[in-house]
Image (cartoon, rainbow, N blue to C red):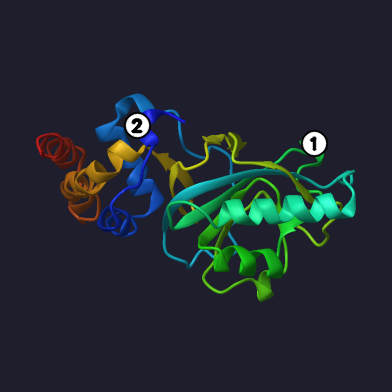
Amino acid sequence: MPQSDSGSVPAAVLEALTRYDTPTICNAMEIVAPERRAIGFTTRPLVCPFPQLPPIVGYARTATIRATVASGLPAAEQQAQRMAYYEYVGSGHGPRISVIQDIDGPDVGFGAFWGEVNSAVHQALGCLGVITDGSVRDIPQWAPGFQALAGSIGPSHGHVHVTGFAAEVRVAGMTVHDGDLIHADSHGAIVIPHHLAEKLPAAAELCARREVPILAIARDPSFSLQRLREALIRSGEIH
C-alpha cells in the first residue's frame, strides 16, 4: 500500500464526504488530482438494489471468492479460514466497506456470497456495505441500511467461499488495496487517496459553484448559444 494511504482520515472529513454523491466526488478529484482522472473508480456497471441509500465512505476490506468449485479444504480448515476472514473484516480503522472480487472468470457471479446472513454479519462487524463483481441475493431480507453494488443478482450459493483476503483486488475496473478509502453510492465507487480526502469537500463546492451559471442559462426559457457562451466564460472564472 502506498505510504500516502497509511493511517486514518479524521472523522469530520469522512462525514463531510458523505454529503456528496460519488459523481461529485469524481468531479472534485479531477480538480485536486488531475493525474487520477482516468484511474481509481468503477468503470463497468454494477447493480444497486438500494439506490435510495445515501453515499457511504469507509476503509476497504478486500477479499476474493469463487463458487464454481468447492474449497477443497477440510471442514475444520474451512471454518478457521472463514473466522480469520471475519476477524480481518472487523479489525482496523472504521467504518469499513467490503470489496470482493469474484475470480470465477467467465462464470463470475455463479454463486452468491452475499445475502441475508453475510449482510447482517458484515454490518455487525462495522461494514457499511459491499462492492463486488459477484452476485447478491435475499434482497428483501438484506440487512437494513447496508449498501450493495454487485455484478448481478442470483439465487444460489453454488460452492462460494473466500479464497483470500487483505490483498489487491479489482472490481468493475477499480483496483483496491486493503485500507483504501472508498466513496460509493448507486452510481459506483471511487478510491480516495488518504492525503487528498480533506481537500475534496472544498473542491466539490467549487464544482457546484461553477455549474450554477451554466445551469441557470440552460434552464432559462430565453436560452441561446450566445448566453451559453457567456455562461461558460463566467464559469471558468470562478475559483
Task: Nearest to the eye among marks 2 and 1: give it.
Answer: 2
Residue 154 image point, x, y percent: 77, 58
Taking depth in this image into account, of 4 and 30 the one nearest to the observer is 4
Determine the residue positioned at 10% across, 38% down. 239
- SS class of the residue under badge 1? helix
Residue 206 image point, x, y percent: 18, 45
Q: On screen, 4 above or below 115?
A: above
Kind of residue at disc 1: Pro
Q: Is residue 62 left or right of residue 27?
A: right
Mark 2 to mark 1 CA distance (whole Å): 35 Å
**Which residue is disc 2 drawn over?**
4
Determine the residue positioned at 74% across, 38% down. 103
Residue 188 image point, x, y percent: 50, 48
Q: On screen, 6 above or below 23?
A: above
Whether residue 127 can be seen here? yes
Taking depth in this image into account, of 208 and 202 the one nearest to the observer is 202
**Which residue is disc 1 drawn over?**
106
Residue 234 image point, x, y percent: 10, 39
